[in-house]
Amino acid sequence: MKHVGHFIAGELLPADDGSQILNPASGKPTAIAAIATPAEVDRAVAAARAAFPSWSAQGLQNRATVMLELRGALQKARDELVDIVVAELGKTLADAGAEVDRAIEVLGQLASVGSWYGGAFSPGVSRGVDAMEVRFPIGVVAAISPFNFPVLIPVVQSAMALACGNTVVLKPSERDPSATLRLAEILSSAGLPKGVLNVVLGGKAIVDRLVDHPDVVGISFVGSTPVAKAIRIAGVSRNKRVQAFGGGKNHMVVLPDADLDLAADAAVSAAYGAAGQRCMAVSVVVAVGIGDALVQKIRDRLAKLRTGDPAEPATEVGPLITADSRDRIASYLASAASQGACVVADGRDVATKGEGWFLGPSLVDHVRLGMAVHSDELFGPVLSVVRAASYQDAVAIIAGHPLGNGAAIFTNDGGLARRFVDEVEAGQIGINVPIPFPVFFHNFAGWKDSAFTETKLFGPGAIAFHTRTKTVSARWPDANPPKVDLAFPTSN
């Protein structure tokens, strides 16, 4: 059986023992993943700290150029990474391919970091005195990633940190770490210096050690809301920078004037992709006055979806990450039915080959506020329909939920869409767009209990997390005498 180790200071460390990695489509073990000891975590942090002075001194333009080289390396390894994601996470081929493609896109967009990076400059604030803000990298950043995007989110977390001159210790999910580990190998082979990016495997004890480590200056976490909140509190109490991103319960409002076919297609696409295991998935449709017609259109589309082996090209919905996840989500369907909701499509009845952790696309109508199926983040292929009498009621439903990653509205009324942007309480807004996950050069972060941070996961707002500034006031004597130099100026 394959053994998956750590990646420290440019070297892959063997794993003699550890935890099993299971294939969600079969339930069978595929590999053994190492569990880092405190000494191995310390070694990874020491490698990152040792690499920091030379990497931070590379200069912004040189680091941006490295991002392009890493992008090329990731493109060449695309199919290999897709296969790993399908085998360990259970994403379909199409979805895994889209994840890797988005990670490649991130690295390309990072080459423009220089256009976001600059600080303020104020000439002549006093006679002969100029003032400016100068950015500096913060040091070693610990990036803690979730299971559901084992390529994209580690790239997002590490790429901005690296481009700004920091070094990184990555801790992927212990459930599917192989893609993240392979990613580190690929980037190192493409020219990333030793120690700049390190990967350690394990669970909560590893996270606790990274949060507590005196040489870790910044912590970037993506995962569940309770853990995000705990990491934020623990990190800030140690005077570390922390950005911690939690879950989402994303609502999609459909108004009576909307194109219902467009809305139904969008709801199905956004709710059931990746078997619903996305923090930006649409998990609640708020139907304003058109519930019966919209539910029927969604139900018709669900009947055509194919659930099964994610390695088969025709599969559209794969398994959940663990048997516990499947059973937990199935219990929500039972609870909703007992509380008076109508389970229109019941994924517990799905028939698939093999012994994997499958739950078919499920649709629950007449969901009322206070039901667990609406209150909790399920993280599975379940779409709830809440019926509302008016636009105002729909906005109030969203405002009443503690999570606020994203929200969408489907309408042809530009005035109401504009009001929705102003009034709804969520960090990402879609207008006739079901998953408003922005391109990398725009900011991403949720509101309310979806994010415990004042900074952004990516985009220009992430610069504030990954750098610190000095404000310089300067008065200079006359300039030095000029000299002739015919060489073309460079950034070196």
Image (tube, helix red, strand yellow):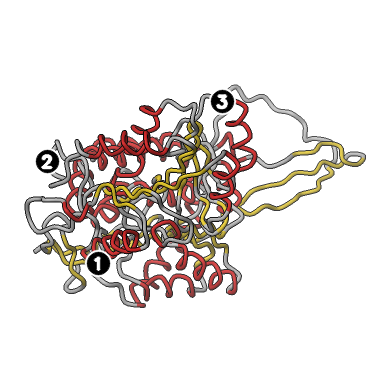
Q: Secondary structure at mark 3?
A: loop
Crowding at dot 2, Cα within 10 Å, few <14 / some 14-19 / many 20+, comes out as: few
Give the residue at mark 2. 312
Name the N-terminal-most of marks 2 and 3.
Answer: 2
Who's the residue at 25% across and 35% down the image? 300
Name the N-terminal-most of marks 1 and 3.
Answer: 1
Q: Position of residue 151 (x, y in %)?
A: 32, 48
Who's the residue at 74% across and 28% down the image? 482
Who's the residue at 30% across and 44% down the image? 272
Q: CA distance from mark 1 to mark 3?
A: 43 Å
Nearer the camera: disc 2 or disc 3: 3
Specify the quadrant of the image occupied by residue 46.
bottom left
Nearest the eye: 421 or 227: 421
Label 1 sits on what residue type? Asp
Is the C-beta separation of discs 1 and 2 under 8 Å?
no
Label 3 sits on what residue type? Asp
Nearest the eye: 400 or 215: 400
Give the residue at mark 3. 413
Give the residue at mark 1. 324
Q: Can residue 440 be seen from the camera position used here?
A: no
